[in-house]
Image: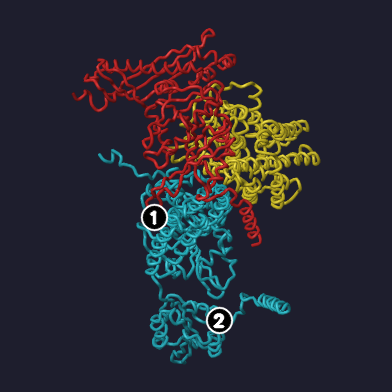
Amino acid sequence: MFHYFKKIVQHLKAESLNQRREDPFAERPEFVLSSDIDQNLTKFREIFGASNDIIIREIVFGQDPQVRGIIMFVDGLVDKKTINLSIIKPLMYDLRLIRSLGNDKVPMEQIKTALLSVGEIKQTPLINKLVDDCLSGETFFIVDGLAEGFMISTRAWENRGVQEPQTESVVRGPREGFCETLRINTSLLRRKIKNPNFIMENVEIGKRTKTSICIAYLKDIADPVLIDEIKVRLGRINTDSILESGYIEQFIEDAPYSIFPTVANSEKPDVIAAKILEGRAAILVDGTPFVLSVPMVFVESFQTAEDYYIRHTLASLTRIMRYFSYLITTLTPALYIAILTFHQEIIPISLMFTLAASEEQLPLPVFFELLTMMITFDILREAGLRLPRLVGQAISIVGALVMGEAAVAAGIVSDFTVIVIAITAVSSFVVAPQEGSATMLRYIYFLLAGFMGGIGITVGVIGTLIHLASLRSFGTPYLSPLAPFAPCDQKDVFIRAPWWSMGTRPRYMGVRDLRRQGHRLRPHKPQEEHLS
Amino acid sequence: MKLEKDMISNSQMAFLLGIYIQGAIFCTALVFHITSRSISLISLTSLAVFLTFVFVYIKLMRLFPGHNLMGLNDIVFGAYIGKAVSGLYIFFLVVLTVANLRLLCDYVVGNYMVETPTIAIAIVFLFVVVWAVYAGLEVMARIGMLFFVIVSVFTGVIFLLSLSQIEITNFLPQFDISLIDFVRTNHIITTIFFGESFMFMMFIPCMKQQNRLGRSLLFGLIAGEISLILSSLMITGVLGDMASISNSPLNRVLRQVDLGQVLSRMEFIVTGILTFSVFMRIAVMYYAATIGLGQLLGLKSYKPLVIPIAAVVLGLVVPIFYTPSAQIACGISTWPFFSSFFTFVLPVVTLLVALLRGFFKKREEECG
Amino acid sequence: MKKAAAVLLCAVIALVAAGCWSSGELNEFAFVVGVAVDQGSAPENILLTVQVAKPSGFKSSINGGGSDEEAYWNISNEGETLFNTVRGFTHESGRKLDFQHNTILIYSRDIAKKGLGDCMDLFIRDHEFRTSTWIAIANERAADVFGVDAGLETLPAVEIDKMMDAQQYNSQSYTIELLDFLKRLKSDTTAPIAPIISIRGEGDDQDIHISGTAVFHKDRFIGELGGMETRGLMWVTGNVKSGIIVVNCPCDQGKAELEIFQAKSTVTPVLKDGDLSFLIEIKEKGNLGSQTCRENLAPTKKLEALSERQNKAIKTEIEAALKKAQELNADIFGFGEAVYRKYPKQWKSMKDQWSEIFPTLDVEIKVQSEVYGTGNITKPVN
């Protein structure tokens, strides 16, 4: 028996050693094309194997002499019309119209410059490069007797198109959202910021997925140190796959164990454009509509796109409400349990006995009663999210209405508990970017309050604030501009000052160009002399 | 050499001092046992007295720029005596941490969690204090500012709510106390409320603009003083002579606050908020003790010392005072003298020795 | 990772260390809303009666629209000392008493005569009790007060609590919180006072009645003030908020009722050549609330005449209170404190002889009142 386990352990050890030896990410040796087309063809067949979406088309073109060529592309990623009309047709028909000039067997230079009517053609002798590009939708073309291949840009595939995003819906404001295609996303941003200083740098991450990633920023505003730091952090990622921006987020964030996100994300081009204009950098990832932006500060979670489009008075009010909602959703169950089990004195007399009456015959201690309800709520929420929309509605009706009502009527939970959970639940949806942290904090505070009452909550809040104050996101303190306090940046924290008064960008990111608009922009009445 | 590498801005330093002074809000029981009517005014005279000592502190810091309290001990007294003096300071800082932690625990245990052992509350509070100390001075300065605002707002709100219960007659006649009582009260407030902030000499070298040192310290002291005055006005105005027999007059006032029978009995929430300031006070003391010891032992980082000191503090927190009333009795009689030795006598002696050994001259020569 | 685990472990230890020592469920406590202290069967005993709210008597969604049973339960326990008696209730009830919501503290007259000091310390010392509860003296047995069915509220004690608040509309009983009572008790000269609660009526038709004021010397009951005398006291202390003063009409054929709107008082001790006297100035503003005569009282002259009568009425009330206080030799007005505030140095010699000085004090009363409005009509209808 013992030996058996020992063997297993040894086996595992050996295996892990083996794995360490074969680094899957070590650079593969570079292959170069040979001038013999048959040799190349066998090589490609070897590389691509039996994949049936790879089309290898052999053609013969030219008149005197006739030349063999291969056109290769991935079905579904290319625009077939372009291939047929702009590559194959010119080669097969139009080439005949050109007289052979010079001694070349094939007039490649002429074919490139005068024949192929497509936007972009690259030339490379490297097989790896050809294969990679082919897999991302380019068509490649090799000719017998030439040790170089041509990459012809033919990318075109089915995409979702620009639609209204499911998250961050607004009443007033642009309704377009990012989609899964990187190029469309960059175009959405470029359409908003028409400025040559708006830089979009490409990086490719993922040994197997070869995901394109784009860092977007304004060169004359964003802190160059920030951009360098992003590049360094992205460069450190050594993984085989990036399927969503969440992967990147977890590789580059500052506080990997924290419950607070230190990288922001958004699905809306206007939000990302605004952040870029504030001096942040955005990270776009191919294959996902969620675009990251860094650095993130805590108060950013309480700002929504619409705050900046509607009147500033209402925007300020709703923003304060959002802060309150965050407090409510994190603290209400904790305060409720602390009051009911430790500090009963705080309940007003008129409420006291109704409350006591409703708690009178409940079988569970109020701690477990509340805990059960909190867990139930989280289950319902998850069920509602994951199910198809129509069934989801049914679930929420059954869960929220029927179960809540029945549980109260059956005397398992008190109606006050249901109210507490309801208000907690409703306010948890208000601050969407911090929903995860709110849920975690809710359970932490709740446990602390259940064990230690008000002191537990105090200790929990102090601990949370210490943690928040010690966080940084790409060098920016997470709690800025509150701590460290920056008086000039307060115009966009608890209130949203009118646009004409926000003359400067936030200072905490160390932007290069602080001023975003002129002075004295407040609208005023036309002066009398103008009228007369 | 100083261990602390974080730099904090002058305003952060001022607010850190402010919240530190505010943290004395739970010590109010001490002074009300002698006299109740004139505390608010006496706290002003105490501040004036303390300002003369602040000049001593500033002078010391100016004489040895870039050196903190432990560093300048080494320079002024030489390596051996300097280490001994630094050792004394560290001893005092640890005792101070313990006493303040005990005060907080007794407040909580006496008023809210009667059946809970003191040590349990101490462990819980020490947990967050240790957390803050690990996070370092920069983080503490950041939350200090937040806490200062929160605590000030709440003190103001409670003051407004208690206005209806404040009776002017409780304040009159002012200064009808014997000279000895006046001096004693003044002494207590000067040492315990203000004087124990001498440990900021550990952090002053971390401040960014050294030339505005005096202004920041003065601002911090006054900012903290405002809250103390508000709370002593509340206590005197609402409780009158009853303040002198209460273990925690502040809590008694909080319990009296009542707005239309709805906003009444909210004391546990208010206490929770006010605890922020005491927490910061303890954290600052603890931190000063830790970096001081680290420097004394010549360590590269103070972090290995945090847990051992926590163990010492936890070990001492229960035995240090026999009962809560013993702490109050000690705070009135012995503690001010014990504390004065470290907060006033030692710095003044340091300055005098520096004078005698001619550090002033040397500096002039360097400058000239 | 190791670090995170260590921190988590510490947090869990801290949590468990402080775990739920002082907690309790709502249905583990019996919430006391009123406390009454009576003389026990033996002379050295006290009889403590508490009114406990019975949650099952209240409306909740579980048992529907409330039940017919009473929502309160009065239990008594006898013992020699207070705290022991309080804890003794667990012999009779399954739940620990919780006094956080106590609204009122009633002592019987017998106990008050013996001195309240013996059975008051607990209510100040223990953290569950609040000094913002009312204090009152019952004319008969204090426990009986809780037995009278409340008119509007579910709990008699809460009814009394509301009544205490309502007393400001008649200003004829001096309602006082425990804290103020204690402040008076702690003072060297000022006499503590408390309102008197009595039961009127017989059988099922009983009502609780609050009027008059009990006067103490130190902690011992020594006498009482009637309604008018109480208002006289309140004029001086500046506690009159509202109330009705009835005077004869200027034509002497009926009564006019004047409602008090604002009242302000200043008490000034005057020390002249070693002789102490007091000047009390009252400024009052009122309104004609109702009249029984047919005369038109709206003209300024008539209103002035009315205020003249009002002055006299107020002065009479104050004089009555003063007379009674001097008879009892109880400084209920806080004159001693006033002297101390103004003449702290001279006070030191006066302090010990205050019981001799007070009964013969010379007090000058100046009342300046004003009848301000006549309500919504000027002339009476007929």
Relative to B292, say whether A79 is above or below: below
Relative to A308, say whether B29 is above or below: above
Q: Colour of chain A?
A: cyan
In screen coordinates, is C350 left or right of A198?
right
Q: Which residue is mark 2?
A: A127
Quarter of the picture holding the N terminus of chain A: bottom right
Quarter of the picture holding the C terminus of chain A: top left
The label number, if any, that marks residue B32 in the structure image: none
Which comes before the other along the chain, label 1 or label 2? 2
Q: Nearer the viewer, residue A240 or A499?
A: A240
Q: Which chain is red?
A: C
Mark 2 lies on a secondary structure that is helix
Residue C21 in percent (x, y) is at 60, 49
- Report the residue at 71% width, 48% height from top: B309
Residue B8 in percent (x, y) is at 61, 45
- Report the residue at 41% width, 18% height from top: C318
| Amino acid type of the residue tagged 2 in the rendering | Ile
Q: Colour of chain B?
A: yellow
In screen coordinates, is A520 left or right of B273?
left
Relative to A338, say whether B48 is above or below: above
Residue lying at the far left in this picture: please name it: C382
Are dots 1 and 2 in contact, CB under 8 Å?
A: no
Which chain does tag 1 point to? A
Residue B270 in percent (x, y) is at 52, 42
In screen coordinates, is A198 left or right of B294?
left
At label 1, counting other C-alpha atoms closer than 10 Å, the crowd grade (few under 14, some 14-19, many 20 or more) is some
Image coloring type: by chain
Disc 1 versus disc 2: distance between alpha carbons?
50 Å
Q: Which residue is mark 1?
A: A306
| Amino acid type of the residue tagged 1 in the rendering | Glu
